[in-house]
Amino acid sequence: MINRRYRAAYLPALFLLLWSTGAAAQHVLVVEYAVQVEEDTLYPGEELLLPVQVLMAVKDDKVLLRGIWPYTSGTYQLYMPTERAEYHCDPEDETAFKLQFQPGKNVFPVAGVTDTIAGFACRKALVVSASDTFPVYYTEAIGMNFCQIAEVPGFALRYTKRIAGVRVTYEAVNYRMEAVPPHLFTLQAWKIVDHRFDEPAIAARIGRKAPAIKTQLLNGKTFGPEDYKDKVLVINFHRTELAAPQLPRAASWIGALARRYENKSGVLFLSANFENEDMLRKLFGAEPSRRLRIVRHAETLAEAFQVKTFPATIVVNKKGKITLWAAEHSLDIDARLTEAIDLALSAGQR
């Protein structure tokens, strides 16, 4: 494991200053988490795409989460578990994108296994997804049930999840009472954008013929039907302003997925991101891998596929039919995509 608490000393101070700025702050419980990354799942350079620290502020039945990254403190997430809602919030333009909060339900307590984390007595549980098992340690002492990845009977103080295909562990190392502006917990006067997708409309597209693609790539070449003939095509659409830090995480995630299939000539990946070309070149390079292509004008491609909610990942099989349309990232997104890609690569796919 790589402990990522090597961060520069000024980062937490700057972050807390930004958090505390504003009207009449109230003192609430703030839990500080260190971040550890499993070394064998990390590609060179990806450590810059993962958080170095996470802070969670707890008030009533709400949790305000903010990550500290090597280059920015980004936006933050507000979780309302009782309402099954989470908001990805941008303080700069006071916009909050609403998502469904859907923690995993396959939780299995581990009898007799306990630990003390940040001074709290914790119990262990295992969260089982389609492709992985994640340990969670939770405490009942905080008086609230919350975990990003699963429904556990307490507040998670150590848990493992995947970010961009990389196994990352958050572990509480400290807690304190700290002043946080109350409006961050209410989103009053903010523009709320409902980010839920139309599930029936998406389901109706499965099995349909995908529109023909002809688009310009970041390397200046044109990508058309002849380039993906008899190949499985995976298209990832992502809007930079919807999460934080959005583009780096999208770059890492789709890049990591493409690298898994580096030696599979029958599949290609397209990254369609609504970002300026300079930023795309900085993050991806003109030709990042043999399997990954970067689209220069994502708007045209999104319009052709009628993509209206982001992020969205579409799998098109060798016959040109849509076999998967994943409209949001979720705990089992890697497993769902891998299954769809492998099935589409098989000879029996129609």
Image (tube, rainbow, N blue to C red):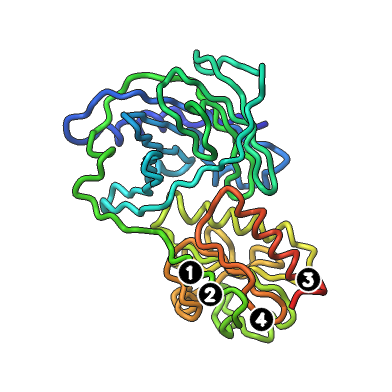
Task: Specify the quadrant of the image occupied by residue 180.
Answer: top left
Comparing 285 with 258, the one in front is 258
Comparing 297 with 316, the one in front is 316
Mark 4: few/some/many CA within 10 Å (<14, 14-19, 20+): many
Q: Earlier in the sequence, mark 4 or mark 3?
A: 3
Taking the spot 75% from the left edge, 62% from the top edge, the residue there is 262
Nearer to us of marks 2 and 3 is 2
Taking the spot 55% from the left edge, 19% from the top edge, the residue there is 122
Q: Tag 3's secondary structure?
A: loop
Residues at marks 2 and 3 touching, judged by CB atoms closer than 8 Å: no
Residue receiving disc 3: 265
Question: With 34 as the anchor, is 291 left or right in this view?
Answer: right
Question: With 160 as the anchor, is 95 left or right in this view?
Answer: left
Residues at marks 2 and 4 touching, judged by CB atoms closer than 8 Å: no
In three-dimensional space, the C-alpha distance between marks 1 and 3, rounded to whole angstroms, equals 33 Å
Residues at marks 1 and 2 touching, judged by CB atoms closer than 8 Å: yes
Comparing 203 with 268, the one in front is 203
In three-dimensional space, the C-alpha distance between marks 2 and 3, rounded to whole angstroms, equals 30 Å
The quarter of the picture where the N terminus appears is top right
Residue 69, position as x, y percentages in the image: 47, 40
Numbered badge on residue 320:
4
Q: Earlier in the sequence, mark 4 or mark 1?
A: 1
Q: Earlier in the sequence, mark 1 or mark 3?
A: 1
Q: Given the current orientation, which residue lies at the most extreme left position? A: 24
Residue 104, position as x, y percentages in the image: 56, 42
